[in-house]
């Protein structure tokens, strides 16, 4: 099965579940400045502290109205089956935590440096390995990359694109020679 790594702009996301696994997914979304809402019958104390729209109630199919992405962190097979059945009628992307075979997408270990995003995925096989690889990549990203990106964004808006100069500046940040 092939995968396509993409970055979605402003998706409507519903996180279902209120335990530690839901908390972990919520923290990832918040760290990446992604807006989402939570529905759960009850919330663990750390989830209660998060400033996120939430409803304390059992999940209902109508909760999926106007939702593009659903993250099921309930561990409840009945909830999972309801979502899978609704997917046949509604165009939603589905992530069922700890059941990668049911997922339309996987969470990547993400590095973010302004507009530069570096994603590492193991397609759900081992998030721990993804995190280790992400951390190793983070060690080689140079300081100043965000400033260079902002400079290039401004130049691009003005119609000034110099590929050779950009490559040279980037290589200097990485202390490497240009090929």
Image: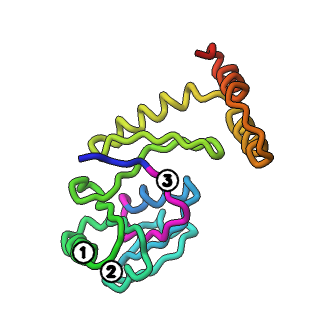
Q: In which quadrant is the C terminus drawn?
A: top right
Which of label 2 and label 3 is nearer to you? 3
Q: Which mark is residue 7?
A: 3
Mark 3 or mark 1, earlier in chain: 3
For disc 2, the neighbor class at 10 Å (few under 14, some 14 to 19, many from 20) is some
Mark 2 or mark 3, earlier in chain: 3
Furthest residue to the right?
Answer: 158
Q: Position of residue 90 (x, y in %)?
A: 32, 77
Residue at which label 2 appears: 59
Q: Position of residue 149 (x, y in %)?
A: 70, 39
Q: Position of residue 87 (x, y in %)?
A: 28, 73
Residue 18 in magenta?
yes
Mark 2 or mark 1, earlier in chain: 2
Q: Which mark is residue 88?
A: 1
**Residue 106 relative to residue 170: left or right:** left
For disc 1, the neighbor class at 10 Å (few under 14, some 14 to 19, many from 20) is few
- Establish if 104 lies above or below 123: below
Mark 3: which secondary structure?
A: loop
**Quadrant of the image occupied by residue 18:** bottom left
Q: Which residues are magenta?
A: 6-21
């Amino acid at each position: 099965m092939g995968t396509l790594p993409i970055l979605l702009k402003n998706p409507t996301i519903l996180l279902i579940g209120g335990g530690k696994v839901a908390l972990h997914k919520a923290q990832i979304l918040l760290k990446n400045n992604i807006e989402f809402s939570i529905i759960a019958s009850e919330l663990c104390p750390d989830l209660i502290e998060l400033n996120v729209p939430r409803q304390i109630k059992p999940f209902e199919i109508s909760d999926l109205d106007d939702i593009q992405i659903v993250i099921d962190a309930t561990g409840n097979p009945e909830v999972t089956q309801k979502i899978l059945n609704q997917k046949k009628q509604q165009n939603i992307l589905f992530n069922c935590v700890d059941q990668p075979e049911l997922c339309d997408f996987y969470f990547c270990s993400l590095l973010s440096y302004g507009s530069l995003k570096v994603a590492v995925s193991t397609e759900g096989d081992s998030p721990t390995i993804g995190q280790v690889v992400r951390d190793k990549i983070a060690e080689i990203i140079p300081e100043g990359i965000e400033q260079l990106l902002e400079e290039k964004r401004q130049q691009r808006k003005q119609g000034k694109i110099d590929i050779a100069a950009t490559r040279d500046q980037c290589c200097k940040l990485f202390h490497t020679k240009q090929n």
